[in-house]
């Protein structure tokens, strides 16, 4: 190896080391709280209250997971989150597909302005619309109903959904749609029968992003569903009540349970999501 090449490798060493350290810190930032939560869910109340603190459970128990469902309406919370998340995701994909296709294919006036508005809306803080949204939902009688969460979650996830799908639709050759329309398909039929299947990684990516956003959202769910029977998992877990002390063991177990659907979804569709994110990034 020549001297300039060796010097070049040495000059890149600090940069690579910095990248590895940053990646390790990000990894630890996610793993340490997750591990602590999992260990806490395996401890008894007596062990959680004893001093000095024990980091590993002395007598691991799964009773906390049974108590979550017997002492709290956890199943109802999970069902509410599932209904709201799936409904918002379906609406996002349906509306986002047509909007993303229009931005990718049609010659729209002020297209760049529309894209700028979408990017701005995706960065819009939820807290700023909370009060007017609450007043609107109360005036139309939608408080403590599924639409009270489904409609706002759809609106909040739509900008990212449209941008992701537009990126994928732009990379699909127009000739495929033209051939489908020559064979008798309308433009809408060509979209759903040809373009969408070819953009499957992007559709999966957008759907999972929309579902995770709906599943994890807390502020709107807390404000728009005051009845316990309508609470989603994040709100219901936060409002867990203990008889004499804060139920850390139940909260930890419930958090682990609430993470299972998202974890399963990511594991099952991992290849499609990674493909969607990387391909969309390269096309963008």
Image (tube, rainbow, N blue to C red):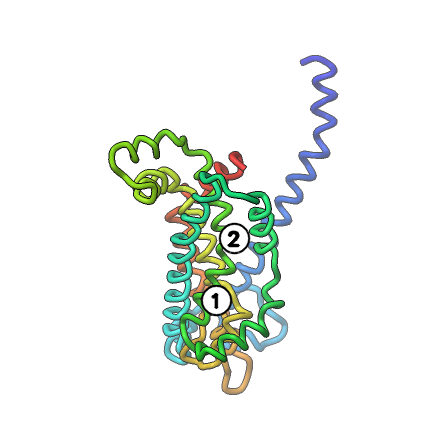
At 37% across and 66% down in the image, what residue appears? 83
Residue 20 appears anywhere in the view: yes
Task: Give the x, y percent position of residue 182.
Answer: 28, 32
Give the secondary structure at mark 1: helix
**Which quadrant is the C terminus positioned in?**
top right
Residue, far left? 184
Pick whichever of labels 2 and 1 is earlier in the sequence. 2
Crowd band around label 2 with a 10 angstrom C-alpha radius: few (<14), some (14–19), many (20+): many
Foreground tag (2 vs 1): 2
Residue, far top? 2
The correct choice, above or below, for 21 with respect to 130 in the image is above
Classify residue 106 as left or right of residue 110: left
The correct choice, above or below, for 122 with respect to 39 in the image is above
Q: For mark 1, what is the residue?
A: 255
Q: For mark 2, what is the residue?
A: 159
Classify residue 264 as left or right of residue 280: left
Q: CB atoms at circles 2 and 1 under 8 Å apart?
A: no
Residue 249 appears anywhere in the view: no
At 27% across and 39% down in the image, what residue appears? 185
Give the secondary structure at mark 2: helix
The correct choice, above or below, for 267 with respect to 89 in the image is above
Task: Give the x, y percent position of residue 92.
Answer: 43, 55
Task: Give whichever of 58, 216 is nearer the camera.
Answer: 216
């Amino acid at each position: 190896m020549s001297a300039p090449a060796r010097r070049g490798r040495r000059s890149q060493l600090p940069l690579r080391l910095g990248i590895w350290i940053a990646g390790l810190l990000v990894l630890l930032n996610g793993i340490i709280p997750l591990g602590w939560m999992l260990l806490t869910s395996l401890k008894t109340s007596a062990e959680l209250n004893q001093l000095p603190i024990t980091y590993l459970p002395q007598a691991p128990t799964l009773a906390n997971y049974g108590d979550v469902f017997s002492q709290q309406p956890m199943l109802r919370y999970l069902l509410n989150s599932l209904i709201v998340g799936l409904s918002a995701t379906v609406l996002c994909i349906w509306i986002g597909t047509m909007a993303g296709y229009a931005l990718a294919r049609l010659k729209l006036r002020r297209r760049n302005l529309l894209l700028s508005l979408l990017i701005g809306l995706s960065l819009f803080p939820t807290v700023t619309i909370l009060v007017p949204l609450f007043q609107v939902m109360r005036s139309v009688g939608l408080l403590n109903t599924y639409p009270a969460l489904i409609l706002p979650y759809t609106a909040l996830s739509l900008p990212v959904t449209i941008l992701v799908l537009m990126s994928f639709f732009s990379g699909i050759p127009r000739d495929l749609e033209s051939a489908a329309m020559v064979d008798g398909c309308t433009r809408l039929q060509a979209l759903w029968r040809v373009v969408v299947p070819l953009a499957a990684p992007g559709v999966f990516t957008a759907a999972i992003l929309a579902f995770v956003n709906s599943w994890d959202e807390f502020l709107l769910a807390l404000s728009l569903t005051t009845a316990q029977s309508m609470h989603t998992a994040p709100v219901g877990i936060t409002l867990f009540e203990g008889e004499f002390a804060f139920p850390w063991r139940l909260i930890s177990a419930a958090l682990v349970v609430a993470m299972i659907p998202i974890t399963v979804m990511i594991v099952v569709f991992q290849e499609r999501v990674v493909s969607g994110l990387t391909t969309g990034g390269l096309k963008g």
